[in-house]
Image: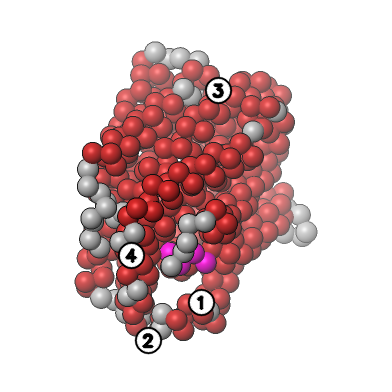
Amino acid sequence: MLDFRYKTLLGVALPMMVSGFIQSIVLITDASFISRYSTEAFDALGNGGLIYITFYMMLLGMSDGAQIIIARRIGENRLETIGRVFGTSLFTLFILAISMFSILYFLIPDWIISYSANKNIASLQGEFLHIRSFSLFFAMITLSIQAMLIAKGRTVVVLIAALITASTNVILAYSLIFGNFGLPRMGIEGAALASTLADACSMTFLIIYLYFSIERREYRLFSYFSFQLKSFIELLKVGTPLLIQGFFALATWTMFFTWIEQKGQFDLTVSQNIRSIYFLAFVPIWGFAGTTKTYISQYIGSGQFEALPIIQRRIQLLTFGFLLITFHGALLYPEALIRAINPAEIYVQKSAEILRLISCSILLYGLVSVYFQTIHGSGNTLVSMSIEIVSVAIYTIFSYLFIKVFQWDIYWIWTVEYIYFSILGGLSLFYLTFYNWKKKVL
């Protein structure tokens, strides 16, 4: 079981943070490439990418459920059950991937055209999703393996997989978007194909690693690998709320950008600039989120409840420090960050102003996310789902008021981020303070 020294906490979190940083650089690189290809393609990539990530987050939610259960079994020293949890999670994610692919490939493109103000951008989103949707089949395997590795704290392997994804994606995106190195000039379809092939490469690496890994022998994965109804019910209880929560969180953000698109292309392009940079801020938050879930679940499983507040405080301190490292540019040189994404000067000033405005909301999120992830790690995922739904409902109401009713300038519309993070953190802290959340049995 993992100890909670700063060195060990960083040993678990840093590979995931570097992995997140690499993924953020990939997103920034893709956005930078496509903005130089076409502004409409840039906007379509942003909105289409959000739709894909919404579906991906549902797979991630279920795999997070598997991570929490596996970490709990490690804390309980019930290693013989891990193979069954792993096999069951892979089967479950496969069924989900088929369902989501069918919706994303066959239904969503026509639906986008029906509500969009700019039909050309809508059509480009459909072209993107027709290719990108195939990545769900690679993601289901990748996420299943990563859930087991993160539960054990073997995050270096996840980092290597991210490096493979990033390097492959950058080379292929540069080649396929612009038609370099003798490959066809495919524009937004090239961006989608590059990301999909990169995901396939990462999945292949993880499968090869798993076959030769210590984990395969230690947990006797292939001996115990099976679908088990008991494990399936456990996974649904823990993972389904996380799946629903992930869907609502990203679907709400997708709706936000849809309303922005209906407001006008200038505001949409400015907002897509912000979205692309935003993911830099999430690097330490996501890294320490996975770390929090693993630690909380392991220590509850071992009955060491007195260590939980210490773990929370140390992760909060580390999260805040790394946020200052990764996102200080939002305050000090936002114009340079925006130009790296989109060099068109017409969008730089407004985008930079918004980036400065929301920078403090990210620091707030970094602190409160530890409380929210603690609820995840404890297995009380129905509670975390309820908190998420309430938070996004309030976020949606204020977004609608700011955009549709008050018709505020895009600068003030983005203040809605403060509302969302405050509600999420306040409700999480309230629950952890007044309810007995440590006794959840998985």
Decide: is 135 above or below 232.
above
Spatial separation of the CA atoms under disc 3 and disc 4 = 43 Å
> What residue is pinned by disc 1?
210
Badge 1 marks a residue whose secondary structure is helix
Label the magenta part by its dominant secondary structure: helix
Spatial separation of the CA atoms under disc 3 and disc 1 = 44 Å
Q: Position of residue 119 (x, y in %)?
A: 49, 34
Label of residue 159 in the image: none
Q: Which amino acid does label 4 sit on?
A: Ser
Decide: is 316 above or below 227.
above
Q: Which amino acid does label 3 sit on?
A: Leu
> What residue is pinned by disc 3?
357
Badge 2 marks a residue whose secondary structure is helix
Spatial separation of the CA atoms under disc 1 and disc 2 = 14 Å
Spatial separation of the CA atoms under disc 4 and disc 1 = 27 Å
Q: Which amino acid does label 1 sit on?
A: Leu
> What residue is pinned by disc 4?
302
Decide: is 408 above or below 250.
above
- Residue 206 image-quadrant placement: bottom right
Spatial separation of the CA atoms under disc 4 and disc 2 = 26 Å
Q: Position of residue 318 (x, y in %)?
A: 54, 45
> What residue is pinned by disc 2?
223
Along the viewing direction, whichever of 328 and 4 lies nearer the viewer = 4
Identify the magenta region.
Answer: 150-154
Number of the front mark, 3 or 4: 4
Q: Marks 2 and 1: in contact by CB < 8 Å? A: no
**Label 4 environment density (alpha carbons within 10 Å; few <14, some 14–19, many ≥20):** some
Which residue is farthest right? 181
Magenta includes 214?
no
Image quadrant in which the C terminus is located: bottom left
Along the viewing direction, whichever of 23 and 383 lies nearer the viewer = 383
